[in-house]
Image: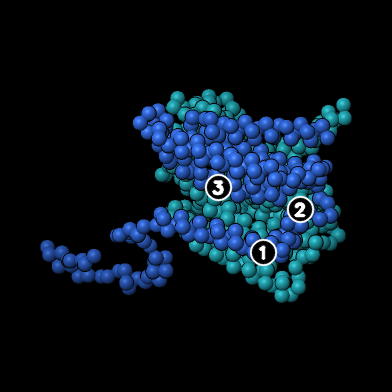
Amino acid sequence: MIAHAIFFYVFSIIAVISAIMVTVSKNTVHSVFFLILDFISISCLFIMIGAEFLGMIMLIVYVGAVAVLFLFVVMMLNVAQQKNQWFVSEANSGHIPVGLLISAIIFCELIIVIGGWKYKPDLFETGNLITNEISNTHSLGQVLYTDYIHIFQISGMILLIAMIGAIVLTFRKREGVKTQSYLKQISRERSEGVEVLEVASNKGVKIDD
Amino acid sequence: MEYVNIIFQEVYKILFLLVPVLVSVAMIVWLDRRVWAFVQKRQGPNVVGPFGLLQSLADALKYIFKEIIIPASSNKIIFIIAPIITMTLALIAWAVIPFGVNQVLADINVGILYIFAVSSLGVYGIIMGGWASNSKYPFLGAIRSAAQMVSYEVSIGIIIINVLLCVGSLNLNDIVIAQKDMWFVIPLFPMFIIFFISALAETNRPPFDLPEAEAELVAGYQTEYSGMMYAMFWLGEYANILLMCALGSILFLGGWLSPIDLYPFDLIPGAIWLIFKILLLFILFALVKAIVPRYRYDQLMRLGWKIFLPLSLTYVVLTASYLFYFNLLPTI
């Protein structure tokens, strides 16, 4: 039990500190790295309370895919230039009051959500990663596709709509792009590609391209 | 005192797993170069030790004594962390690989998800190394590899779902035991082929070694690395390849099960069979490196998203319908 407590406090301290560092650190790429550290320690906490499936899925989806895309975008931005525009010059600081207002609203909402939360009394007693009769994954699978099928499908549709929206927003048709058709390349024969010409001396031939 | 004992026991177990893995990584580099050479009618490394077996050791010694150069304009902390992350992630995944009925370091319920999660974290070592170098070629290599690894992870995930449908458990030992009657390579043969090719792409092996394509990007994300840090990238890469071979043999080739369940074959311990299967897959990896030319980047992306993803998704539907129709779905 003591070891459990030590691990819990280590992971939660890492989670809290890295969450603070996400907002505090000057370099945007560093804050994404701290965000990743935060995700990892949170998923360790999930595993510790016995929700091993949730913890692993969190690692795969958030850390393995979403944060990679985050990092991708942030690395491409010209961070130093943006920092100058947003925080150093006083002319462009009009967004700060709006930002404060929005963060205050979100903070209030979070307090309402957390206030209504009912914790399980023996949260740490159930933590068990070793094989037992019915695992967390099995029990999740039994309800997810039967009792909660509609909610599951609707959340899938929302993600699909978000994806289509992102594609529609960024898609533009470009003119004059040369593409390769693999079928055409493979089905090409010698008679289409090669032609034997009689070349008259000093006159040459004209090749239509 | 009790805690100290437990910690010592665990450390002993971990070393018992990690030391052979590290040694075999060094040996596997030699095997890779040797197979590559034989395909091209060369000798390969054959000078240091018998058959050149100690070549990797000599290389490692050379790397250790070389100076580590850290570029002045690099982001130093991340630059140093990157190879450490690559190597650590390549090694911690071995914790759940079963070598026998109870011969596994951590027999967790979600073993396959754990391996999948760890291998999806592997991309960070490369991205961090490429970005922290603050140089054009490493950055391009890192971006390429990130896109490549994320794309091929999707198809590997769906292939794993195919296997899980037949097993009904995420535990790696259960997956092996479910293949007692028939290895999954027989009913899921197309998936095995796709898994093999995706594993090549996932570990940045030729013909998908775009992140380190030497003709275009010098050495990709590891251009600025030298000495021991380069060697760590290199060890991590080969440990990852071995891990993918182990995963392939557990998912499709029956893991530690013996191919024939008869008298003389039962006596051989499961670990030997697993190692034998890993070696078989690795020799295939090495042969592919020698005989296939490198893909172009758009061809790579097309293969991942437009061919492998629809194929494996279709196979999931087929497998699920087959199991459902013939009432073969595994019970808990």
Label 2 marks which chain's residue? A
Disc 2: which residue: A136
Q: Which is more toward the observer, B253 or B93? A: B93
- Calculate the distance from the C-alpha at mark 1 to the C-alpha at mark 2: 18 Å
- Calculate the distance from the C-alpha at mark 3 to the C-alpha at mark 1: 25 Å
A141 left or right, relative to B82:
right
- Write the residue at 60% across / 29% down: B61
The amino acid type found where label 1 is placed reads: Ile
Tag 3, which secondary structure? helix
Tell me the colour chain B is drawn in: cyan
- 1 or 2: tag closer to the N-terminus: 2
Q: Does the image show residue B255? A: no
Few, some or many residues within 10 Å of mark 1 (<14, 14–19, 20+): few
Disc 1: which residue: A149
Q: Which chain is blue?
A: A
Assign the N terminus of chain B to one quadrant of the image: top right
- Expressed as whole percent of the image width and height from the top left, the position of residue A80 reads 41, 32
- Write the residue at 36% across / 61% down: A179
Q: Quadrant of residue A156?
A: bottom right
